[in-house]
Image (cartoon, helix red, strand yellow):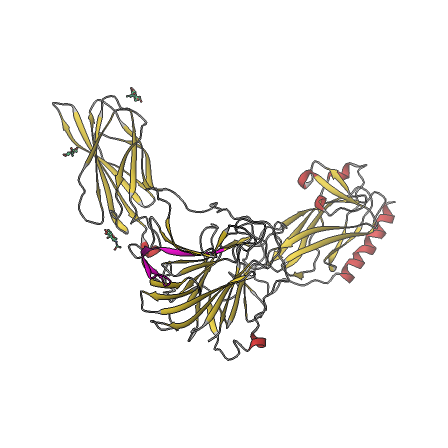
Amino acid sequence: MCCNTCTCNQDIMKLLHYTVYTIFLAGLVSVQASPDVLEAENAAFFEGKQVIPRSDASGQATLKIYKGQAVSIEFCLTKHSEIEVQNVWYSNDGESDLITVTVDNKGLGKVVTEPLNKDGEGWNIFRPSGPLGSIVYLSEGRHQISFYVEKGDEYGVEIDKIELLLHNGKEENSLDCKVFCFDDISYDHGIADTGFGLYTSKGKLVQKSKKTLCAEEDNIHIPIFHDSARKYIISANLPQYTSFANSRMADWENCKMTQSLWSFRDIELSQTQRVTQASGVATMSVTPLDTDQQSHLISYGLIIEFSLDGPSLGMMDSELGSIIKVYFRGIIMPVDVSMQYFGRRSQWSESTNKTVHSNKTWDTWNVPDFAWREGRGNSIRLTITAFKEDQIQIGEIVMDKRGQVIDQSLMAYYDGMTIIEVVDMDVWWRVNETMTLKTLNNGRVFQGVDYFRIYRKIPWSEKDFCQVFVMYQDGNVRLLPITPHGLDWIPFGSSILIGQSDHMAFRPAAPLRHADIDPKELTIQLTYWDGSFLSLKLDITMKETMVIVSDAVYARPLASYPFLTFRSMWVADGNADVDHVGVDGNEPHHILSGWETLRGTSYAFFRKCISKHNTLSPDLRVKIID
Ligand SMILES: *[C@@H]1O[C@H](CO)[C@@H](O)[C@H](O)[C@H]1NC(C)=O
Ligand SMILES: *[C@@H]1O[C@H](CO)[C@@H](O)[C@H](O)[C@H]1NC(C)=O
Ligand SMILES: *[C@@H]1O[C@H](CO)[C@@H](O)[C@H](O)[C@H]1NC(C)=O
């Protein structure tokens, strides 16, 4: 018996050396330290599939296969990669088996199992095959790794798990198939057919995106440069991938989104020494001030100094009013608390006094809008007066942003087909900067506009309208095609900044001064604060919403100030408002990686992978005509 097995094994070893070619790792940049694991029991269904419970197996189960059987396990790559099998973990009780391993019908190598005779005990002993030798290049998407038992005894062999090594540099990859990507999505850039673009000089897209984990942050930032940009077309279509899901809720997971600007907890008020604490952007100190021996009163001075983000970072924390909240513990006799703040006016405010009677009840003070300054140099001061005998503590002191009132909108135009609304936001990040809007049909002028939006009647509805165009005072535009039949609304996703902006700015803007709208023609003349002018014409069809921009006159040099900026979000494929960019019909690039500048006249910003975020938000295209 033994001898038989040995011969058999030697045969296999020869075969192994002969057929398996090895590619050495030379030239590959980095190898992921830990292998990715596929559980064999997750193999696709096949006739007679047997999953065996085994206590020592990974996932407490194995897949049993017999001579002549072939099994496949599916996995996905989010990025193209070279892969190799580091180990196939198996158990065997009996003679050696020979298993051929392939991926998408390309050979990865062979596994020769060690013989073992343990009267059945051997099935719970797992052993690694060692590296199979071959490295295979795989594109992103779905793949199958397959096992075929060429030789083996009647008891078969059990496979526990497969360890794969992915060689794809530092980029993350993952094997699960939660995300579905279409590999056949393309846009017809129509350059050759129409002649458009043939004689137009090429524009340049510049990669200025950064990574994020927060789906509500616009991390994709692509300024577009062109030497004239007198005329161009932007269009918004439904995504080209096929999905009827309409997921559209904001996802604040991994977003830095706190109402509190700072907070301190459990502050002991010491009668003898100064106590300090730091917390993020704020530092706190409490000092015993004076004690009145007669009245047995002691005062403490608590000062919190902090910095706030402001408009230069596209934030409003330094502009918005805030609420200071505090509660105490250990209150026996009433405690007097006086609050003052110091900020933009560089002097302490009047004090506002309160008397605290109970433990654990919040007292609040409101600080008005525009009281703070951007950056450092903000403070609050509490003077706390209590009986010396009472050991009081501050349970917590917090500063929150004030709540915001919802946007106030006003109908500027209505004709049964089109609605135009002007909107005033409670807090607009371009502080104190607004635009005016004039409806040319009646000459009416609207002041203090933060943004305006245009609705279109939905052709298949009796009374419903949908938003197709929104333009903010900072030049940002959001576009939607008409809501598809059967849905109530679809979300915006990517946006586009129309007008020249400083691409180095933390939050770029092309601030608008005025818009003249002809509501019947749907033409808009824009005047910018920098002196630029543009004409827009909206063309809303069943299929898409188009904005034709023409007669552009730019105030700043086109070589250094982009005329357009594409902005969007990408956290991962499948959680993104855009995942690819295609230029002039060439092989599309991933939106965040593998390129720095792209040249051409026609750009498509689209998704290949069905996104759980804003599933039906549109793909956007830009085509430079002149
Ligand atoms: C507050 O809590 C302290 C104990 O921490 C207690 O002695 C005191 O009576 C409480 N004060 C009031 C007003 O309930
Ligand atoms: C508030 O209290 C402070 C001392 O704690 C005092 O100087 C100030 O006059 C008081 N302000 C008012 C308005 O009562
Ligand atoms: C905005 O207006 C308010 C109130 O008039 C003023 O206090 C504030 O300083 C202004 N801010 C800027 C940035 O001009």
Would residue 209 be seen by someone viewing this image from the given angle?
no
Q: Position of residue 103 (x, y in %)?
A: 71, 57
Q: Residue furthest left?
A: 294
Magenta-span inclusion, residue 445: yes
Figure quadrant of the N terminus: top right
Towards the viewer: 421 or 573: 421
Magenta part of the protein: which range?
436-456
Q: Position of residue 442 (x, y in %)?
A: 35, 61
In this rendering, would 593 be left or right of 476? right
Would residue 249 be seen by someone viewing this image from the given angle?
yes
- Residue at image location 13% in from the left, 23% down from the top: 295
- Residue at image location 24% in from the left, 30% down from the top: 270
Q: Please count the marks in the image.
A: 0
Q: Position of residue 252 (x, y in %)?
A: 46, 45
Towards the viewer: 137 or 176: 176
- Residue at image location 28% in from the left, 34% down from the top: 364
